[in-house]
Amino acid sequence: MNITVIGMGYIGIVNAVVLQLYGHNVIAYDINKDKIELLKQGIALTDEPKLQDLLGEVGKSIRFTSNAYDALTPNSIYVIAVDTPTSKSGSPDLSHFYNVLDEIIKYAKDDSYIIIRSTVPPLTNSKVREYLNSRSEYKFSVLTIPEFLTQSTAIMDELNPSRVVIGAVDKSARELAKKIYADYAKRNIPIVYTTPENAELIKYASNNFLSMKISFINSFAQLCEKVGGNIDEVAYGVGLDPRIGKEFLKAGIGYGGLCFPSDNKTLSWFFKENDTPDDLVEATININDSQIQYFVDKVLSKVKSLNNLHIAVLGLAFKGGAEEVRNSPSIPIIKAFTDKGAFVHAYDPLAIDSFHQAMPRMARVRLFDYLFDAMKDCDFAVILNDSEEFQNLTPQDFKNHLKKPIVFDGRNLYPLDAMKGIEYYSIGRPQLK
Ligand code: UDX
């Protein structure tokens, strides 16, 4: 099938390469000419694992363009994957999204299908239908097919999703989706056909539920500390119940990234807009926010003054293996340290560019290219994400490179037994001295 994917951000490029891999003819469109030029040269623009390889494999068959006429006139199936940032109040900014609809109205030359893959609040599909069909001579059928991609496994997630949710109002739209996702059905991947409204709600409910599990376990972690428990053992025992499941029960400094924080804000806004109590969503957000102060307080309770101390900060991105520092707990934690007069030696090779963009003038912070250089002569270390490189560290590494072997682990990376011999503080577990 001939499909135009609009918006070459993270979601868009993953969709473009996977649709092409499944034998569709893809036009990939973005208004950013520089981005398109790089993609034409086969440069993936992100370190997402497997993306570069897949782009090498199928990129030559994809037609990349920044010209709206070339992208939108030849096809009549449009996948919209532009970003939809969230404002402080939680209401989403759909301006890019509506700009795309205007371009489609301008350039489409036939009745068309639109597949919404951008994250948009519930009820957007019906508004889009109304918007398009009141402004164009052609008929538009609008599907909502939410994505559930996780950074650093996005290609595998798109190739082998736990389910494909298809929100469509008419039969022809469902038939179209059936053809596009034929390969998934053959592989017995569950396909959920539902209304657009339900598809929109499924997306938000999934992300909220996962983040709620994280906030749940973090609040229990705080309780464990008070009563001498060990949150890892509690989570293990709880997670063995298949009705609960063991995933997303890892205690730490909370969730970050581009999805959970903004999706929860949007969901809370949407509950309120619809006059529905949003206590669970609010609690999820508040507990997550409070984990940051809780971690900073933990450090301050052990190290009385941070003034002129040097702190090795291991991990800037919101999780190991990712590049993104936007909405990462590392940013407010580093800010709290530097506000109290500390110098930060930060290490996270994947996140350097993203950190510079998010924090162009962060005084008292120095980025290091090598892990042990960052740790050298520091008074203590804090671990803020679960990068594989950190998981392999031993007590001896901390003894060798820090002034004193004191570690605050915000991700519970090591079994307590493995950290004997150093001063080790983690989340919801007994401290080692
Ligand atoms: C998430 C969802 O997993 C994905 O389905 C959705 O489409 C987008 O949001 P992502 O943000 O890439 O994906 O990362 P994920 O691995 O889910 O982690 C999110 C955050 O939660 C990270 O900061 C991670 O460190 C934290 N986390 C995750 C925990 O603190 N504990 C856990 O048990 C799991």
Image: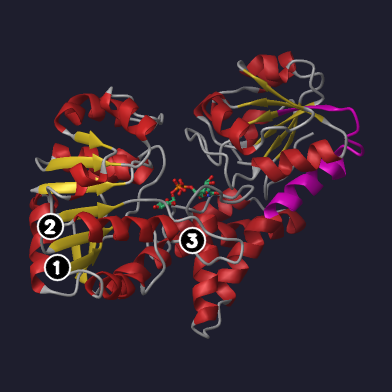
Could one spot residue 355 in this view of the protein?
A: yes
Q: Say above or below: 101 vs 40.
A: below
Q: Quadrant of the C terminus?
A: top right
Residue corresponding to mark 1: 138
Q: Nearer the viewer, mark 3 or mark 1?
A: 1
Q: Is residue 223 left or right of residue 108?
A: right
Which element is circle 1 on?
loop
Residue corresponding to mark 2: 109
Mark 1 or 2, nearer chain start: 2
Q: Is residue 398 left or right of residue 88?
A: right
Q: Is residue 255 magenta?
A: no
Q: Nearer the viewer, residue 384 or 235?
A: 384
Q: CA distance from mark 2 to mark 3?
A: 28 Å
Mark 2 or 3, nearer chain start: 3
Residue occupying the point 36% across, 70% down? 124
Tag 3: residue type? Asp
Residue 93 marker: 3
To which quarter of the image does residue 61 belong? top left
Which element is circle 2 on?
loop
Q: Do residues under tags 1 and 2 come within 8 Å of each other at their CB atoms?
A: yes
Q: Nearer the viewer, residue 196 or 334?
A: 196
Which element is circle 3 on?
loop
Confirm or reject: label 2 Cβ below 8 Å from ligand 1: no
Q: Do residues under tags 2 and 3 come within 8 Å of each other at their CB atoms?
A: no
